[in-house]
Image: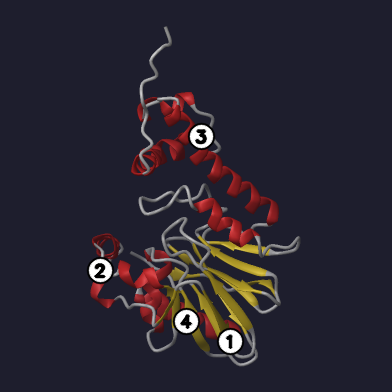
């Protein structure tokens, strides 16, 4: 698999974004007076090392630390390229290294699972990073796209890196490890930081504004609410698409319906036949 890194381009003063391929993942760069911070690290140790090199070329100062927004390969597997630096992530990220899913993903992208490294600075709720004299806040607002989503907020620039809690390249990625019911609440935490001029950099795709973020939050909530409504009406999963009103395209909805029904079943909510009243 060919890994590459595009040019770092500014989205605000001293805040830049590059796209790492082939996953088209946004890599953040926050530049301080005497150092810089990389947000997300790419899909392999080699790509992580390349990101670090390109970041220092663009910033003109050394990389001081790296942040991983969640455990998925395109954001996390490049952390080995920053192994000698502080690596920040939610405490759940390291646990995924021992999961079969993580080792399988590594094999699929041609990465040796044993070459991956755990974040050296795990945290549960929030940390503040001094980026060579500039403040960056990293926060876990709860489970959503994964169990360990982290956002990085640059207060003096009005920029938030959201990881895959938000997407603009397409619909949100509803993987098997997402938490549909809780996802909107995690986005609410992000929205609580958003002002009129805030720039939100999603995990994939162009920067988003406040309206786009509010809209996507409502769509995620609407998807889960619609499935919950259908289950309460006794509609089986096989019939759900035809009987529902959906905020996303057919392919996305059909793919997520088994997951949504399973997560509702875990709460004891399953379709039950409604007998007619006599």
Residue located beneath label 3 in the image:
226
Report if residue 168 is visible in the image: yes
Distance (Cα) linking label 4 and label 1: 18 Å
Q: Where does the image place residue 94, in percent across and percent down from the top left?
A: 34, 73
Q: Quadrant of the C terminus?
A: top left
- Element type at mark 2: loop
Report if residue 166 is visible in the image: no
Residue neighbourhood size for the residue with mark 2, other residues' Cα within 10 Å, grouped as few (<14), some (14–19), many (≥20): few
Residue shown at 25%/68% (left/top)?
A: 98
Mark 2 or 3, closer to the camera = 3
Residue shown at 54%/51% (left/top)?
A: 184
Q: Where does the image place residue 154, in percent across and percent down from the top left?
A: 64, 75
Label 2 vs 1, first from the N-terminus: 2
Residue shown at 63%/53% (left/top)?
A: 213
Distance (Cα) linking label 4 and label 3: 43 Å
Residue at the far right in the pictured view: 196
Q: In this view, does 17 lie to the left or right of 231?
A: right
Label 2 vs 3, first from the N-terminus: 2
Q: Which of 70 and 229 is in front in this view?
A: 229
Q: Where does the image place residue 51, in percent across and percent down from the top left?
A: 47, 77
Residue located beneath label 1 in the image:
130
Mark 4 or 3, closer to the camera = 3
Residue located beneath label 4 in the image:
52
Q: Which label was assigned to residue 98?
A: 2
Residue at the far bottom in the pictured view: 34
């Amino acid at each position: 698999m060919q890994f590459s890194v595009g040019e770092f381009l500014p989205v605000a003063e001293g805040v830049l974004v590059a796209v790492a391929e082939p996953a088209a993942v946004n890599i953040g760069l926050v530049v301080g007076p005497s150092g810089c911070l990389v947000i997300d690290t790419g899909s392999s140790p080699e790509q992580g090392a390349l990101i670090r090199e390109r970041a220092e070329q663009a910033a003109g100062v050394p990389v001081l630390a790296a942040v991983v927004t969640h455990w998925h390969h395109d954001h996390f597997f490049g952390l080995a390229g920053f192994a000698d630096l502080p690596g920040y992530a939610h405490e759940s990220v390291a646990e995924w290294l021992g999961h079969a899913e993580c080792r399988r993903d590594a094999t699929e992208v041609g990465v040796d699972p044993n070459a991956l490294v755990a974040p050296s600075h795990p945290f549960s709720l929030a940390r503040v990073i001094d980026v060579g004299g500039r403040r960056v806040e990293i926060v876990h607002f709860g489970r959503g796209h994964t169990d360990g989503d982290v956002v990085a907020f640059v207060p003096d620039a009005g920029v938030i890196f959201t990881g895959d809690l938000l997407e603009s390249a397409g619909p949100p990625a509803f993987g098997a490890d997402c938490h549909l019911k809780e996802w909107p609440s995690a986005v609410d935490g992000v929205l609580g930081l958003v002002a009129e001029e805030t720039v939100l950099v999603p995990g994939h795709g162009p920067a988003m504004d406040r309206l786009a973020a509010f809209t996507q939050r409502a769509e995620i909530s609407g998807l889960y609410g619609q499935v919950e409504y259908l289950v309460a009406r006794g509609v089986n999963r096989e019939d759900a698409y035809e009987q529902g009103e959906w905020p996303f395209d057919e392919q996305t909805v059909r793919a997520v319906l088994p997951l949504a029904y399973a997560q509702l079943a875990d709460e004891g909510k399953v379709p039950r036949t409604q007998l007619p009243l006599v």
